[in-house]
Image: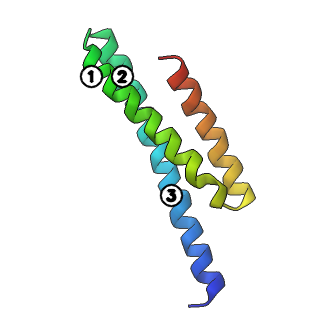
Amino acid sequence: MTFEQLQEQSNRTLHAFLQTEITLGLTFVKRAEFERKNGNDQHFQKCKVNAILAAKTIERFKERLATNEKREIETSATELHTAIAAL
């Protein structure tokens, strides 16, 4: 395998990881909303913290992506940040 192939594979893996973090973060937001609605403040706070951690992970690693993939992740990350802010 050439260096370029390894780099491309690494980039695809990172992109998939960040997509998973976005999905996970949005899932934690939905769960937090559910917990708040049902009066479970402790669970609400835990889910909110987990959503924030997912967002921080995305911010930490997104710079390693190629420009097009980075834009895609940034767009989805903005959605996650907006959802967290609405909690």
Label 2 to label 1, Cα distance in Å?
Answer: 7 Å
Q: Which mark is residue 32?
A: 2
Of marks 1 and 3, which one's residue comes earlier in the chain?
3
Question: Which residue occupies 61% across, 90% down?
Answer: 2
Label 2 packing within 10 angstroms: few (<14), some (14-19), many (20+)? many
Callout 3 amino acid: Ala
Q: Is residue 57 left or right of residue 76?
A: left
Label 2 to label 3, Cα distance in Å?
Answer: 24 Å
Label 1 to label 3, Cα distance in Å?
Answer: 28 Å
Label 3 packing within 10 angstroms: few (<14), some (14-19), many (20+)? few
- Residue 4 screen position, x and y as percent: 66, 82
On screen, residue 8 above or below 79: below
Question: Which residue occupies 46% across, 46% down?
Answer: 21
Question: Which residue occupies 38% across, 18% down?
Answer: 33
On screen, residue 17 above or below 33: below
- Residue 6 screen position, x and y as percent: 57, 81
Badges 2 and 3: C-beta atoms under 8 Å apart? no
Question: Quadrant where the N terminus lies?
Answer: bottom right
Q: Residue furthest right?
A: 67
Q: Which residue is mark 1?
A: 43
Badges 2 and 1: C-beta atoms under 8 Å apart? yes
Badges 1 and 3: C-beta atoms under 8 Å apart? no
Q: Which residue is mark 3?
A: 16
Callout 1 amino acid: His
